[in-house]
Amino acid sequence: MTKQARLNRKAILAYFGLLFGRKKPALAARRFLNPRYRHHGPGCKGGVGGFVGYFSEYFQRYPDLRVKVRRATAGSEFVVLDVEVRTRPKARPAQATEFYRMKQGKISEHWHILSDPALVRPLIKVR
């Protein structure tokens, strides 16, 4: 693994801990998101402001949310995570694959694939 890949992996894991472990979306955004950040998932409005609003609402809806990174791999531009998600302590876990594009040490884009689309459905606004 190259030095840049190690730095990218370390940044994403720190971001994940701050966002999902401590549930601090505004702080995670300030520290880790590129000002031109794009979230390619449904329900999340564009930009840093949309990210903060989306996750603030998500954590209100799922206060017991637990996320566990099972695997993390990185390259010079992308980081990919295999993640286990539980919305309640005894809930059956869902799986997610998270893709992050890094630019100059910051997250510039994000995509994910979820085994249970219900994880995002309650927050998708019909336009």
Image (cartoon, helix red, strand yellow):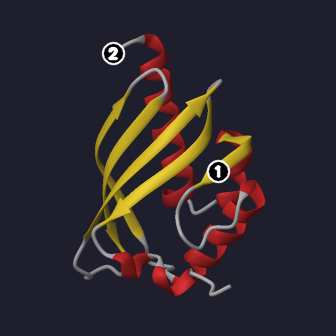
Q: Is residue 87 visible?
A: no
Identify the residue at the far top of this view: 3
Question: Residue at position x 53%, y 33% from top?
Answer: 11
Specify few, some or many for label 2: CA neighbours under 10 Å numbering under 14, 14-19, or 20 or more. Answer: few
Residue 96: image location, x then y, percent: 33, 60
Residue 42: image location, x then y, percent: 54, 70
Distance from the alpha carbon under mark 1 to that under mark 2:
26 Å
Q: Indicate the secondary structure of the residue bearing disc 1.
A: strand
* Quadrant of residue 73 within the rendered picture: top left
Question: Residue at position x 64%, y 59% from top?
Answer: 24
Question: Residue at position x 47%, y 82% from top?
Answer: 121
Of callouts 1 and 2, which one flags the residue occurring earlier in the amino acid sequence? 2
On screen, 90 above or below 65?
Answer: below
Residue 19: image location, x then y, percent: 56, 56
The residue labelled by disc 2 is 1
84 or 43, nearer to the observer: 43
Q: Quadrant of the N terminus?
A: top left
Residue 49: image location, x then y, percent: 77, 61
Identify the residue at the far front of this view: 127
Question: Which-is-in-front pick, marks 1 and 2?
Answer: 1
The amino acid marked with disc number 2 is Met
In the picture, measured across the screen, residue 27 lies left or right of residue 40, that is right
Q: Is residue 23 visible?
A: yes
* Quadrant of residue 53 within the rendered picture: bottom right
In the picture, measured across the screen, residue 56 lies left or right of residue 81, that is right
Specify few, some or many for label 1: CA neighbours under 10 Å numbering under 14, 14-19, or 20 or more. Answer: many
The amino acid marked with disc number 1 is Arg
User: On residue 38, which mark appears?
Assistant: 1
Q: Indicate the secondary structure of the residue bearing disc 2.
A: loop
In the picture, measured across the screen, residue 111 lies left or right of residue 95, that is right
On screen, 90 above or below 17?
Answer: below
